[in-house]
Image: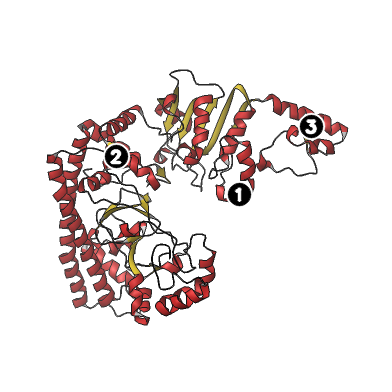
Amino acid sequence: MRQGNSVVSDRRVDPLAFDWGLERDPFVLSELDPADRADAVAVDARWREGFDVVLANPPYVRQELLTAYKDHWQASFRAYDGTADLFVYFFERSLQQLKPGGRLGFIVSNKWLRGGYAEKLRAMFAKQCTIDTMVDFGHAPIFPGTDAFPCIITLRKSPPPPEHAVRVTLYPREELGKELLASYVEEHRFPMPQAKLDSAGWTLEPPGVQALLEKLRRNGVPLGEYAPIKPYYGIKTGSNEAFLVDLATKERLCREDPRSAEILKKYLRGQDIARWPPEWAGLWLVLLKSSGDQSWPWSNTKDSGAAETIFAESFPAVHRHMKPLEEVLRKRTDHGRFWWELRSCAYYELFARPKLVYQEIQFHPAYGLDRAGYFLNNKGFLLENEDPWLATRTHTSSTTCWAPLKDEALSLAGDKIVFVPIPRANAQQLAATAPAVESIVELTRTSAEATAAVLDLLRVEYGVETPGQALGDFSNLGSDAFVLEVKKRRPKKGAALSPAGLKALRDLFEAEATKIVEKRTRILDLERTIAAAVHQAYGLTAEDVELLRATQPPRMPPGW
């Protein structure tokens, strides 16, 4: 069948198989009439010959939607990875279709620059291709209405000459629309030796920043060597609805059965892990460990029905809480021996010990010293260490150098943190930072408690059930703004504030906000002391520190 200048078959060929060319699908050729067959053979010959140029904006499709094709791709592509985005296979097939010396130009998501799934693809580019240009747009909205995080790569299908340098441009989002794209790229490009772009994640930074990174690396040791520790993931429940409960639910379960308190533990979400001490939000974990990790009254019971009966007798309120979710809990692939149990975990005891906790995804370095024995959900990690020097190092801006960006956030998920270089501190630096850390933790804790007390008073005395972001950090407001925000958050049908009530609000603000601001000022001074000690331990000059601050996202407090 002929359509315009194209030859197609009634038999539909799935394009995602990437088996382009009739030699891969002889059934298509056999279906065509003689005239169409001649055209098809000519087209196929052209595919086998290869192309001088391939230009593309391939689709971005997450691997979870591509399971039907993975076995085929694994057998057909050297760059295959089970978690790879669809565009990885467009890259490899396009390279195959290029003639030697042919050119490729793609605009595509920048996630492959650092993603583990593209390690084989990066190795292929580094050895077999001469990369001419790279333009990384980061979060700039090149495609209106879409956060695609695009980059543009152009290359030639030929091994890179010795000393070849790639022309790299980093395009900040705030520059979009200010001048012609081509002009900005030409004016702000810098050379990067292609030899630095290997199978590991590609870091596209100007020479000065590369030198600074090397200095940090040279004057420190990887965290995994500094301390014999590794990061541990928070609890993966498989059903947060069943295992993670709020204060009201916790109190109800304990009223119905006081024994429920034995298996209810305080836990932190990723967002509760703040700088220095964590900020617990009153949330609880139903800690029903797997029978493989703890001996329960039902652990040795082989019959699941009998085991459930014992569970219901042991913790009746928790059983009633879990029972409506039984079907969901049974479908988990990671439950314990019985459907109501958590998956097996070999390090439960670490949660109860003093530790350093941090967010999986961070918008600023957020590491907490936890001495209260909180559990974590799966948006947090823990390090079995409360070394004050380690805590100071992870809070500094130099940490962000080793945290790959994920949607303009910092990602130190999994074992990435073990590669962060930690400088060795001398006695003077340790003497300056250890007491500063303890003071910051205490000041931060008491500031959070004072804020919580004010919000509780507003709830009880003024009916402010939902304080919102502004009242949640009320010390940043002025007196008038504080009063207006309280009025806005009060019940619509409540009585108007009396003059006495209004005066009480202003007095409350002046008394509490002033103390909190004083504490924050003291914290900032202490953080500056810590930052100076860390920078000194790295051997950073004033110029190094200025460059570090200028090239890192504006996520650090002033002075870092």
The residue to which callout 1 is attached is 67
**Marked residue nearer the N-terminal end (3 or 2):** 3
> Where residue 219 sits in the image (x, y, percent)?
25, 32
Q: Quadrant of residue 453?
A: bottom left
Q: Residue at x 35, y 70 (%)?
A: 264
Secondary structure of residue under mark 1 = helix
Residue contact at pointers 2 and 1, CB within 8 angstroms: no
Residue placed most toward the observer, 265 or 216: 265
The residue to which callout 2 is attached is 225
- Residue farthest to the right, as pictured: 34
> Where residue 412 sits in the image (x, y, percent)?
37, 46
**Amino acid type assigned to the residue bearing label 3 in the image:** Ala
Q: Residue at x 37, y 77 (%)?
A: 253
Q: Quadrant of residue 261?
A: bottom left
**Marked residue nearer the N-terminal end (1 or 3):** 3
Q: In the rendered view of the protein, which quadrant contains the C terminus?
A: top left
Q: Name the side, left or right, on which 54 lies relative to 384.
A: right
Q: Residues within 10 Å of mark 2 (few under 14, many from 20)?
A: few
**Marked residue nearer the N-terminal end (2 or 1):** 1
The residue to which callout 3 is attached is 40
Secondary structure of residue under mark 3 = helix
Q: Is residue 320 visible?
A: no
Question: Is 49 placed above or below 278 here?
Answer: above
Secondary structure of residue under mark 2 = helix
